[in-house]
Image: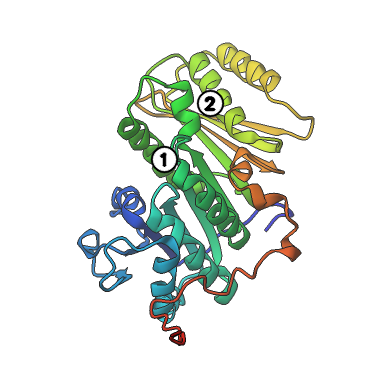
Amino acid sequence: MSEDGIELRKPVLLIGIGKIGKDILSNLKNAEHDFLFIDTLIEELEDSNSVHIDCKSWINPSIYKIRSFLEFHKEEISVKLSKYQTIILVTSLGEKTGIAIAPMVSHIAKGILNKRIISFVTMPFGHEKDRLFQASISLKRISLNSDINFVVDNDAYLEINPYLTVEACSKITNEIVLNTIKLIPEIALTLGTSIVSGTLKENSIEVGVKDLIAQLYSSLGTSTITKSILYVNGARNEPIGRLNQILSNYQNSMEGDANEISFVVSDSSRNNMHLIASIKGRTKFDSYDPLNLIPDENILDWDIPESHPNIDLPLPLID
């Protein structure tokens, strides 16, 4: 492993958490690796290699309540993860299930089993105010437990494509996650957090690159870019001079002298592009949690369960 990179080893387990995590990975079912699906809804778990977090009689359990029920499955999950060298975790932090479960599963994989872990998370839309705070907390905890954490920002994609419906936007960002997972064997993986931007539109490369950069800077906050890789699919037949000009324009658009830039062109029937930017510092997602300014040593212990499924307080009766 290089100073800032990571090399992965087989066997690999891909974990889909919640409906969106499962839907994304279901498109990879012909892959050579194994799969595990975790959800609170048993109807979403058709595969035999799954863990159902049974919330008993609770119809609409809170995030904290879901975590408390997951405590009963920690040993089961640990056993299922134990034989693998590398864990790839996929979830949406726009879903209550992903917010609740993903941090705990990442802790089991890294904190208890010390596995290599790569996480892929999608962030909620800006209008999902009830999700933003908890999503920020979960993202921080997933990042701490992951060797590499890829983040796709639904809100950034919708910002440059305001004509899209929420459903259409989510479908596209889920495909961006899927395409990035497929790139893992080909790319030099950098430790830490990376923001992933993508475009699936059939427009010019120049317009696509502008869209990617707009998405990236929408998510950056005060963080800085340390390394970025621009993938352009379907451009093998483009003149070298044009590609060099696009790369030059891309480099001029990126900020920070420390930014190490790579440009990869591949064959494809579609002109889709991806920008993977490794970052350091605070992103806009940190602002979702106003308590993020408090130093870590002054916050409550994350490992202490916030809820218990059966709380029976012996409260005295007062006459």
Q: What residue type is labelled 2?
A: Leu
- Give percent across and percent down for residue 314: 45, 87
Q: Which of marks 2 and 1 is in front?
A: 2
Q: Are marks 2 and 1 in contact (CB under 8 Å)?
A: no
Q: Quadrant of residue 18?
A: bottom left
Question: In the image shown, does 88 or 3 lie closer to the viewer?
Answer: 88
- Give percent across and percent down for residue 267: 42, 29
Which mark, residue 179?
A: 1
The relative height of residue 143 versus residue 152 in the rendered view (above or below) is below
The relative height of residue 100 versus residue 271 in the rendered view (above or below) is below
The relative height of residue 125 versus residue 236 in the rendered view (above or below) is below
The answer, for residue 123, to whether it is visible in the render is no
Secondary structure found at label 1: helix
Q: Where does the C terminus fall, quadrant-wise? A: bottom left
Q: Would you name the residue on which mark 2 appears?
A: 212
Question: In the image shown, does 290 or 214 lie closer to the viewer?
Answer: 290
- Residue 184 shown left or right of residue 253 in the figure: left
Q: Which amino acid does label 1 sit on?
A: Asn
Neighbours of disc 2 within 10 Å: few (<14), some (14-19), many (20+) = many
Query: How far apart, in angstroms, are the residues tagged by discs 2 and 1?
Result: 15 Å
Neighbours of disc 1 within 10 Å: few (<14), some (14-19), many (20+) = some
Q: Quadrant of residue 182?
A: top left
- Give percent across and percent down for residue 148: 59, 53
Which mark, residue 161?
A: none
